[in-house]
Image (tube, rainbow, N blue to C red):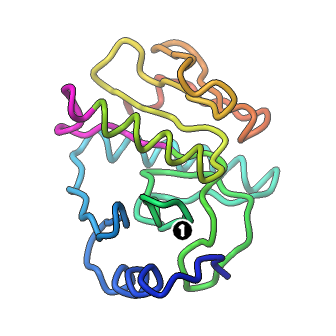
């Protein structure tokens, strides 16, 4: 189902199937991703549950942590968001052939500092270049808990705080989630 036909990339994807744990293909190599802690994992789970309920009513599919989405970019061949909403073709037992409409990245303990900020900005740019419409940057230690980045204005996020309803327009039309639910 994938549109990727480069033999080296096909080999990397085959290797990714055999990789234990969460990983992505970036800059021609498989990059392992650290496990997450208590609060970030619970927040990602709450987002998945909300997206799953939306998908049951409106279509599309919600994905939890560790689902792989393929991409055909020069520097990136896959994504593995913490949660996602997807309306593309299904893939059975294979990786999903295209990136999600909404990708959710929940910050873990090591996702802070100038280097981490550059890496997250690069990953958002890759998501948008691959066709993702909206990326959520969830920071449970910030007053601006959910920053919603859109492909149409990737440098101008909308920020949501506790007590507010976060959204993911236009990727997930009409869906909203109380920010407070990320802390349950």
Q: Which corner quadrant of the image does residue 149 belong to?
A: top right
Q: Which residues are magenta?
A: 104-116
Count of numbered badges drawn on the protein: 1
Residue in view at x 36 percent, y 79 percent? 16
Q: Position of residue 121 (x, y in %)?
A: 40, 34
Q: Which corner quadrant of the image does residue 112 belong to?
A: top left
> Is residue 182 part of the magenta span, yes or no?
no
User: Is the residue 3 above or below the residue 54 in the image?
Assistant: below
> Is residue 106 part of the magenta span, yes or no?
yes
Closer to the camera, 88 or 180?
88
Residue in view at x 78 percent, y 37 percent? 173
Q: Position of residue 183 (x, y in %)?
A: 37, 29
Q: Position of residue 60 (x, y in %)?
A: 74, 58
Residue in view at x 51 percent, y 16 percent? 159
Closer to the camera, 177 or 77?
77
Closer to the camera, 162 or 25?
25
Q: What residue occupies the far right of the structure in this picture?
A: 58
Q: Residues within 10 Å of mark 1 (few under 14, many from 20)?
A: many
User: Is the residue 163 above or below the residue 67 in the image?
Assistant: above
Residue in view at x 47 percent, y 25 percent? 146
If the image is split into quadrants, where does the C terminus sit?
top left
Q: Secondary structure at mark 1?
A: strand
Q: Position of residue 107 (x, y in %)?
A: 31, 37
If the image is split into quadrants, where does the N terminus sit?
bottom right
Residue highlighted by disc 1? 70
Judged left or right of residue 156, residue 115 is left
């Amino acid at each position: 189902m994938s549109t990727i036909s480069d033999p080296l990339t096909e080999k990397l994807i085959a290797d990714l199937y055999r990789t234990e744990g969460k990983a992505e293909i970036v800059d021609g190599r498989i990059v392992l991703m650290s496990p997450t802690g208590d609060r970030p994992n619970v927040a990602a789970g709450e987002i998945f549950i909300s997206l799953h309920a939306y998908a049951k009513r409106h279509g599309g599919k919600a994905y939890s942590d560790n689902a792989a989405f393929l991409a055909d970019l020069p520097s990136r061949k896959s994504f593995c968001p913490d949660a996602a909403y997807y309306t593309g073709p299904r893939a059975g037992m294979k990786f999903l052939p295209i990136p999600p409409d909404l990708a959710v990245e929940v910050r873990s303990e090591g996702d802070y500092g100038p280097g981490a900020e550059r890496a997250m900005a690069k990953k958002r740019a890759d998501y948008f270049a691959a066709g993702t419409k909206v990326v959520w940057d969830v920071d449970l230690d910030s007053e601006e808990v959910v920053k919603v980045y859109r492909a149409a204005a990737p440098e101008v996020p909308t920020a949501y705080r506790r007590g507010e309803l976060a959204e993911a327009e236009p990727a997930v039309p009409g869906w909203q989630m109380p920010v407070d639910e990320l802390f349950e």
